[in-house]
Image: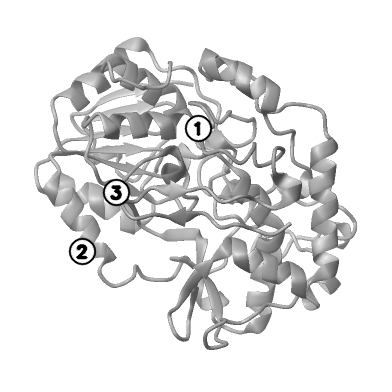
Amino acid sequence: MTGAAAVRSGSSWQADRILPGGQLEIGAGPPGLRGSLAGGDSAEEGPGGGPRPGAAPACEQAPEEAVQKLAEFVGLRRRLVVVTGAGVSTESDLPCYRGTEGAYSRGFKPMTHQQFVSGPEMRRRYWARSFFGFPKFNACRPNAAHHALTALQAAGAVSSTLLTQNVDRLHHRAGSRGVLEIHGSTHDTVCLGCGSTGSRAELQERLAILNPEAADVLAKEVRRAERAGENRLLGAGGEGRLPGAALGVLAAAAPPPPSAVLSNVAEDGRLVAEPGAGLPQAAAGRGGQTRPDGDTELDQELVESFEVPGCQVCGGVLKPHVVFFGDNLPRGRKEALEEAVRAGDGLLVVGSSLSVFSAFRLARQAKQEGKPIAMVTAGQTRADELLDLKLECLAGDVLPRLADALGLPGAPAP
């Protein structure tokens, strides 16, 4: 990292809707998840979503001097553009692909665009896995990092436009405005025929109706999660990173641990599990066999019999409204991202390795335009040589303390 100051340390679905002005209206999950995995129907989850072991990498707390350096960096700018990645959501228990704790390290490879469009068999396999993964994905809530970014944005400490690689829409749920989703969102679907868009939550209901056997297996897993007594949101050191004011709320109402099926969910909502991960017999591949792409099979009979509905407008092929690996950004999005960076006076990257070129090019553009770049990300990144300041720490540790150091009103307690 040339010239940079690096700081290192160890009954039916109701869809979310983006309202005019960018505010997110939180929809209710299925009845079996309300008050358990979903953590209630309210969007007000408090400043901490609860780090959980197995998602966020192990990291020591950032030194106070490092947070102060970041506060100085932010304070010198008026149009600081924030770019976020999967590392922001790991503390909401959404595992990332990359890094030592990522799905790639366990051999998982996501389906590519070319595979998805190659035929109905691949799409059936995708939607079967997605069907089992979506409830837990949809139940995740913002953590301290999301809420801190919302406070920074509301106070004008960073740009009113927030760029994110994440497809989970947790920034919206935390109250951020002007969120530009680089890769789209798994909460939406799009028809490859007519281009009409729809709600992933509503598609989940259609999939359940068409696949009663799979729906029964999933319902049993949800009930098993509800019966579990251990509170994993507060365990394994989570208390040290959660604001004190949130602990009482979480202790009384935090969701119980999900079952084996619901806990093995990737950052895009698909089911991911290691061989022998304890999936129920009705859902697991016989013997926990892993396919060449690293994704654990569901029971083959369950996959082969899984029915996928078509577009309700034209009957065409439905796809999650995200940019798959091997796909290109939609027309106009690249230009919108470039314009956002051009309008800023610096870049703050949070929770991203910038390994994907669509995100790395933003850092490269900022550097070419002579704008400084700071980063809060655990581990090495593709852009390390471009950085002016780097904190190799968790976003949920650093960002609330940054907001506090800047004296922002409504900031989550560090």
Label 2 vs label 1: CA separation?
30 Å
Front-lying residue, 4 or 27: 27
Q: Coloured how?
A: one colour
User: Which quadrant would the C terminus be assigned to in this image?
Assistant: top left
- In this picture, is 310 found above or below 22? below
Choose the circle earlier in sequence order: 1 or 3.
Answer: 1
Residue depicted at x 74% and y 57% = 11
Residue depicted at x 50% and y 32% = 143
Q: 231 left or right of 379?
A: right
What residue would you read off at disc 1?
Answer: 143
As shown in the figure, which amino acid type bears the numbered disc 3?
Gly
- In this picture, is 202 found above or below 317? above
- In the image, residue 274 lies at what x, y percent? 73, 50
As shown in the figure, which amino acid type bears the numbered disc 2?
Glu
Quadrant of res 154: top left
Label 3 vs label 2: CA separation?
16 Å
What residue would you read off at disc 3?
Answer: 178
Secondary structure at numbered mark 1: loop
- In this picture, is 402 found above or below 332? above
Front-lying residue, 159 or 59: 159
Front-lying residue, 217 or 334: 217
Instruction: Note whether residue 396 is visible.
Output: yes
Of the residues tagged 3 and 2, which is closer to the observer?
A: 3
Choose the circle earlier in sequence order: 3 or 2.
Answer: 3
Q: 262 left or right of 342?
A: right
The dot on residue 335 is 2
User: Which quadrant would the N terminus be assigned to in this image?
Assistant: top left
- In this view, the residue farthest toward the left is 370
Secondary structure at numbered mark 3: loop
